[in-house]
Image (cartoon, rainbow, N blue to C red):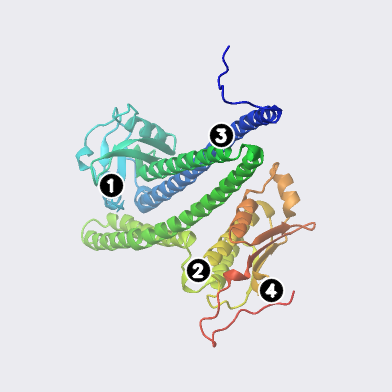
Amino acid sequence: MPRPFPGLRLGYAGKLALAAALPLALAVGGIGWLVLQQSRTAAAREIAALEDQLTAAKREELRNYAALARGAISAIHGPAAFDDEDAKARALQILSAMTYGRDGYFFVFDYDGTALAAPRRTELIGRRWHDLTDTEGTSVTAQLIDLAREGGGYHSFLWQRPSTGEEGRVISYVIGLQDWRWAIGTGIFVDDILAAAAAARTEAQARVRETFLWIGAIAALALGAVFATGLALAMRERRRAEAARRALTGRIVDAQEEERTRVARELHDSISQMLVGVRYALDLARRRLDRGDPRAAGSLRDGIAGLGRATQEVRRISRDLRPGALDDLGLGPALKSLLEEFGARTGTQVAFETVVFRNRLSEEARVALYRIAQEALTNIERHSGARRVAMKLHGTRRGAVLRIEDDGRGLAAARSAEGRATGLGLRNMRERAERLGGTLAAGSRGRGTTVEAVLPLRHILPAAAPSAEGLPVAAE
């Protein structure tokens, strides 16, 4: 039998090298496959987390819009009878005027499926759409009405954009007015979420392909070191995946902060002004009606008072999403206002102490410390049963320090009372601090809990001028 390679003569060393190279090549192939699978899994988790975060933000935005719509007509709906057609007409007028963005509006169906309000799809009004389905066959109106009968809920379907006429995926949230048999809701198109996920998936696939090609090239050039190289690549890919996860978490947090700022500005600049305008219109109607039927005056006065409360509620929501004091006055006044509002709401005795930072903290540090304080106060309100809360903001040689103490039942007792291991709030606070290179510590000694967040000195900006007040440094 002829030899496959007549000119090739392998000695013992060559055969041994070939025998050693073969399992190494198999090891390289196995490592390459493992890295490929791990990269795909990590990318899939990151993309799923991105979609979940963005979808959750959209759902919360929808709930806020629905609450705003209900508050806008509560003064009319509350005292009205189930057959008060005048009250229904005024409520529909208010809801029809409440539009936002390019495509946002509020729709109203009665429980028979008749469209009562759809300001950017006026061709739907007055017709019965109970059996309406989208192009995929998903029930639209009937499902929305069923959710409204149950009190409210989310529904996703395909719908035409009013601005372009193109079809897109929308998430809708609907609430029900049972006495009027109305389903009131609004929707947000989520094409941007799908596009972001698709772009992230494409990028991840490209990164995986690039990684696999690098592994193959290294294996072809140096089979003798393929095992060590494979391990090094695996560790490098793990570090890259971890760095990508941290960067993605940072982008999500930044996106949430930007979204809160945008929604706060929109609520204050558009919805609040619109409600004030409606208030003036109702006041004018009251004066005109006073010259006619005197019984209408009482209802209109109630409507004016309700719209005033709605305006205040819009401003409160705006402050919660992005407190104006944080941008206008700085972190100290914003934290003081947050703590005082917490004390007024819960009846807890509060104390606040700070130094004058003179806007010496970076923007991301101010936001992080404010959100940490928000989360800590939320945990105290929900779990601790504290009667006294003290907050201190100051600077040390370590950096900016925020310290929050309460006299509640402590972490261990709170976990025992909840019947489960609480800690999601603490993990969120810790991740915020660690993202900026800081630390967060929480502990209890018997009763009471202490939470201390420290951000490094690099987040304390230099003074703008020699006369500017510096950051006092406390002795450690």
Residue 351 in the image: state x and y as whole percent: 65, 70
Residue 37, numbered label: 3
Of residues 129 and 16, the one nearer the viewer is 16
Residue 326 is labelled as 2
Front-most of residues 352 and 178: 352
Which dot marks residue 92?
A: 1
Residue 317 in the image: x percent, y percent? 45, 58
Whether the residues at callouts 1 and 2 have beta carbons within 8 Å, the answer is: no
**Residue 440 percent across, percent down from the top left:** 67, 59
For residue 116, what is the image quadrant? top left
Give the distance between the C-alpha atoms of the residues marked 3 and 1, in whole angstroms: 55 Å
Q: Which of the two discs, 3 and 4, sits closer to the camera?
A: 3
The residue carrying mark 4 is: 397
Three-letter code, disc 2: Leu
Circle 4 sits in a helix, a strand or a loop, which is it? loop
Q: Quadrant of the C terminus?
A: bottom right
Question: In the rendered view, would you say 214 is above or below 76?
Answer: above
Is disc 3 placed on a helix, strand or loop? helix
Mark toward the start of the polypeptide (4 vs 1): 1
Amino acid residing under circle 1: Leu
Q: Earlier in the sequence, mark 3 or mark 1?
A: 3
Q: Earlier in the sequence, mark 1 or mark 2?
A: 1
Q: Helix, strand, or loop for circle 1?
A: helix
Q: Amino acid at mark 4?
A: Arg
- One can see residue 405 in this view: yes
Residue 68 vs 287, above or below: the answer is above
Q: Quadrant of the N terminus?
A: top right
Local crowd at mark 1 within 10 Å, few (<14), some, or many (≥20)?
some
Q: Give the distance between the C-alpha atoms of the residues marked 3 and 2, in whole angstroms.
A: 45 Å
- N-terminal of the pair, mark 3 or mark 2, is 3
Q: CA distance from mark 4 to mark 1?
A: 60 Å
**In this picture, is 23 found above or below 462?**
above
